[in-house]
Image (cartoon, helix red, strand yellow):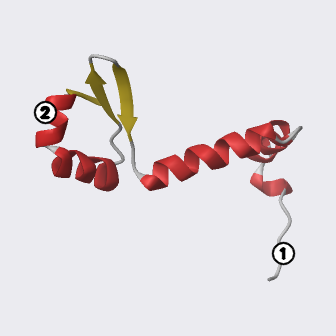
Amino acid sequence: MTTVNITNARQELFKLANACIKFNDRITVSTKDGNFIMLSEQDYNNLLESLYLSSIPGMYESIKEGVETPSSELLDIEW
């Protein structure tokens, strides 16, 4: 994660935006009133999806069970 102050962020906005988009870098911008985070739209949407899925009762356990299932126990499904 990159940290930059607001003055430098203004001067380097295009470069910082490209770092977020192309390299999934998260940028912390510091100001005298507090900090904020820049991240790509894709990372933002992924975060929202993760929050949504984690809000569904039993979803975490279901995903964990699926990840821990050996491939030998999986069914072949013809689509």
Along the line of sight, the residue nearer the viewer: 62 or 2: 2
Q: Nearer the viewer, mark 2 or mark 1?
A: 2
Q: What residue lies at 14% left-to-right and 31% top-to-bottom?
A: 7
**Quadrant of the image for the C terminus?**
bottom right
In the drawing, does residue 1 fall left or right of residue 10? right
Q: Which residue is mark 1?
A: 77
Mark 2–mark 1 distance (CA, rounded to whole Å)? 54 Å
In the drawing, does residue 51 fall left or right of residue 23? right
> Label 1 is placed on what type of residue?
Ile
**Quadrant of the image for the N terminus?**
top left
Q: What residue lies at 55% left-to-right and 52% top-to-bottom?
A: 45
Mark 1 surroundings: few (<14), some (14-19) or many (≥20) residues within 10 A: few
Q: Which residue is mark 2?
A: 8
In the drawing, does residue 50 fall left or right of residue 32? right
Q: Quadrant of residue 77?
A: bottom right
Mark 2 surroundings: few (<14), some (14-19) or many (≥20) residues within 10 A: few
**Vertical order, 21 against 52 (above or below):** below
| For marks 2 and 1 on the same chain, the one whose residue lies earlier in the sequence | 2
